Amino acid sequence: MTINLIAFASLLHKQASIRNSHEAVLSELEKYFTVKFIDHQDIDKLGSNDFKIIFIATGGVERLVIQHFESLPRPAIILADGMQNSLAAALEVSSWLRNRGMKSEILHGELPSIVARVHILYNNFQAQRSIAGLRIGVIGAPSSWLVASNVDYLLAKRRWGVEYFDIPLERVYEKFNRITDNEVGASCAAVASQALACREGTPEDMLKAMRLYRAVKRICKEEKLSAVTLSCFKLIEEIGTTGCLALSMLNDEGILAGCEGDLQSIFTLLAIKSLTGKVGFMANPSMINTRTNELILAHCTVGLKQTEKYIIRNHFETESGIGIQGLLPTGDVTIVKCGGECLDEYYLSTGTLTENTNYINMCRTQVRIKMNTPADYFLKTPLGNHHIMVHGNYEIALNEFMQANGCKRTE
């Protein structure tokens, strides 16, 4: 991890004395990071992939800093340990920047706290850089019932750097029809052999589901997609199968895949992956108990690698094709949803996955979660239907990331 300290110091101070004056904080940073000192005059030599911190080394540099306003990193992270009147200058600079709409934060205080904060800010920076430029394929139109899950493609690109691309379902049909059963037979056998059980789905259903997976995967490769959301219900009418297995396998292979053409949820999956390295479970909140503060999430697909065991089923609503009933590990989980047409709102909470349920009138994969915050959010101020669950407690990291990007948290 390399941090570039953009040094601002008064001409009255020599370079050697600057190092000596800030030895404590600089030595501590060098224990954990590769620290590069950059003179403020060389700030434009740094690239967009370089993590930058404004290092206020002395007082009297306020005007010098604001003269480089256009080149300063955004958000502005300012290091000031207080030596040589550095904190006084940092306070003035921070106020000036914020008055001009620029997010600013001063790193100051106990050394372990500064190091911990730099780690968080560095991870935020890396996550933002990893998202920028990613391509999300929208195969078919979003499902008609997702009336509150729209995304403005242009605004999303301006805020996050992601690009949504519309891809007609006809391309899927064309590739699907060219793939033979013989091409996918071995893959079908492998998935079936590792299942705990195979229930409603027939061998023909499995072959069709695997052919669909291959078709969508080829489109993802051709279009260089990092993520895809599939209008899966329309597939049933045309080719007689659902996208549940296809999405499951794509997620396992690192191509994030979501259901029903949900534009907000597929971005949520991307944000989670960029920060945690994990793939989330996209699901419907299917039952809420505000007295016990419990939530049941359910959907007919989940990444096979997220499960401890899985059962091959059919799709719940249509009773056709292949669905996945995954049995997920119990323990800490985080529930997330990014919302708003420009993806500037979010819900975030934690809980404990206590049980894999098996209600006959819900989607196949079902989990009961004991929430750590009031479950009545889902009844009073929900950001739409689908929410994403990821194993582990990532509330602090995800909250920092969303706040750094100017998003509003919904409670």
Image (tube, rainbow, N blue to C red):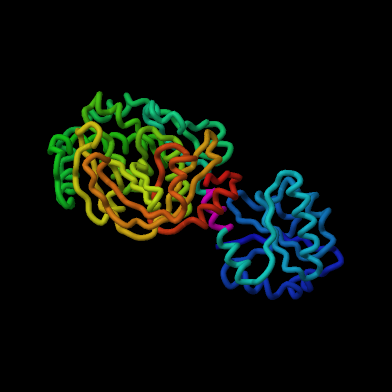
- Magenta segment includes 260: no
Q: Residue at x 80, y 63 (%)?
A: 88
Q: Is residue 54 above or below residue 67?
A: below
Q: Tell me the quarter of the picture where residue 308 sits.
A: bottom left
Q: Is residue 200 above or below residue 303?
A: above
Front in this rendered view, residue 138 or 152: 152
* Residue 38 appears anywhere in the view: no
- Please give left or right for residue 346 compared with residue 211 in the image: right
Specify the quadrant that holds the N terminus.
Answer: bottom right
Work out whether residue 379 can be spotted.
yes
Query: Which residue of the protein is positioned furthest toward the front in this rendering?
Result: 291
Q: Main secondary structure of the magenta part?
A: helix
Region of the chain picked out in magenta, as a range:
121-129
Is residue 124 one of those drawn in magenta?
yes
Residue 205 pos. (x, y %):
17, 35
Foreground of the two, 318 or 116 = 318
